[in-house]
Amino acid sequence: MTFSGVFAQEATQADTVHTEAHAEGAFNANDVIIHHVLDDHVWHFFDGHYGTLYLPVIVYSEARGLEMFSSSRFYDDHHQTVEYNGYRLEHNHITLNGQPVLDVSITKNVAMLLINSTLLLVVLVAAARGYKRNAGRAPSGVQSFIEPIVVFVRDEVVKPNIGHRYERYLPYLLTLFFFILFGNLLGLLPGAGNLTGNIAVTATLAFFTFIITNVSGNKSYWGHIFWTPGVPLPLRLVILPVEIIGIFTKPISLTIRLFVAITAGHIVLLALISLAFIFQSITVGLMSSVIVLFINLIELLVAGIQAYVFTLFTSLYIGMAVEEHDHH
């Protein structure tokens, strides 16, 4: 038998096995990874009815106004999508009789956002109370963990980049740092949502930075953008569009950097975990588990680094906007 004949036979057998496995509902790593990375109206923790949290659906349409119901209405006993009262959920988009509606539902990422914000408030308020209670004494409890991080962000990130006006922006930058840090760490928990790997979340954070930076911009900042000093007039015609584009590329870079770093980490972890289910081998399972543990430790480091980098660049952009330039 020729090599071409062997490969043709193996390919045919592989196609047959793939078709039979697909028909029997074999494990699909792609579906698992995409389902975790993207947002959803249902939150799956593990297989089974009791491992699924059906989130509230809140939709508005001109025909019916505001309506609220559970996302469980979209699924039957076999977890197949069904139509409910004219509403249909397809590819995570809700339509009413085929027409799009305004969807403001509590999705998985929105729920994660609420959890992250609540945890942020609880931890930071507890640290603030500890600071008042232990005035003049050594920190204790939550304060002993949070205070060194606050001092580090203030003295090593914010103050060197913004200068003597740093106190005005410190509350925002500390909130930014801890929000991203907590979101990154919560996203590594089993069954958690991909909050900081959602580009809508990272874009919103970058938008806040964009607004604060440009509203705080002084005369020198805008002068360097629209009329760069010490540059010949013909060259200014080249620099001007570059500077204007730079105003918008800064928040875009913040958005993409955080989104890509967190999403890529989640994809790598899930892909390695999926190997055990794909090969159905104890050896592969043990090897992938060891690698996942190692990668997870790296992701813990990445969670802190990404919060640091986002805050660092935000401080740098604000510092450039409020800096007084001396042209003499």
Image (tube, helix red, strand yellow):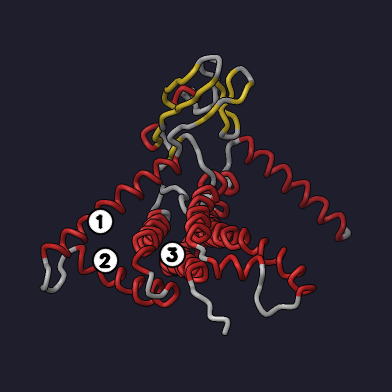
Residue at 34% of width from left, 71% of height from top? 154
Q: Would you call the spot at circle 1 few (<14 residues within 10 Å), some (14-19), or many (20 or more)?
A: few
Q: CA distance from mark 1 to mark 2?
A: 8 Å
Q: Earlier in the sequence, mark 1 or mark 2?
A: 1
Question: Mark 3 is on which residue type?
Answer: Ala
Disc 1 is placed on an element classified as helix
Residue at 44% of width from left, 66% of height from top? 311
Residue at 75% of width from left, 78% of height from top? 232
Q: CA distance from mark 3 to mark 2?
A: 15 Å
- The picture places residue 41, in percent across and down from the top left corner, at 48, 34
Q: Are marks 1 and 2 in contact (CB under 8 Å)?
A: yes
Question: Mark 2 is on which residue type?
Answer: Ile
Does residue 119 show up? Answer: yes
From the image, tell me which residue sits under label 3.
307
Q: In this rendering, is residue 109 above or below 282? A: above
> Is residue 328 shown left or right of residue 282?
right
The residue nearer to you, when weighing 265 against 105, is: 105
From the image, tell me which residue sits under label 1.
123
- The picture places residue 3, in percent across and down from the top left corner, at 86, 60
The residue nearer to you, when weighing 271 against 309, is: 309
Q: Residue furthest front?
A: 328
Name the quadrant containing residue 82.
Answer: top right
Q: CA distance from mark 3 to mark 1?
A: 17 Å
> Is residue 34 shown left or right of residue 229?
left
Q: Quadrant of the N terminus?
A: bottom right
Name the quadrant containing residue 184.
Answer: bottom left
Q: Which mark, by number, is residue 146?
A: 2
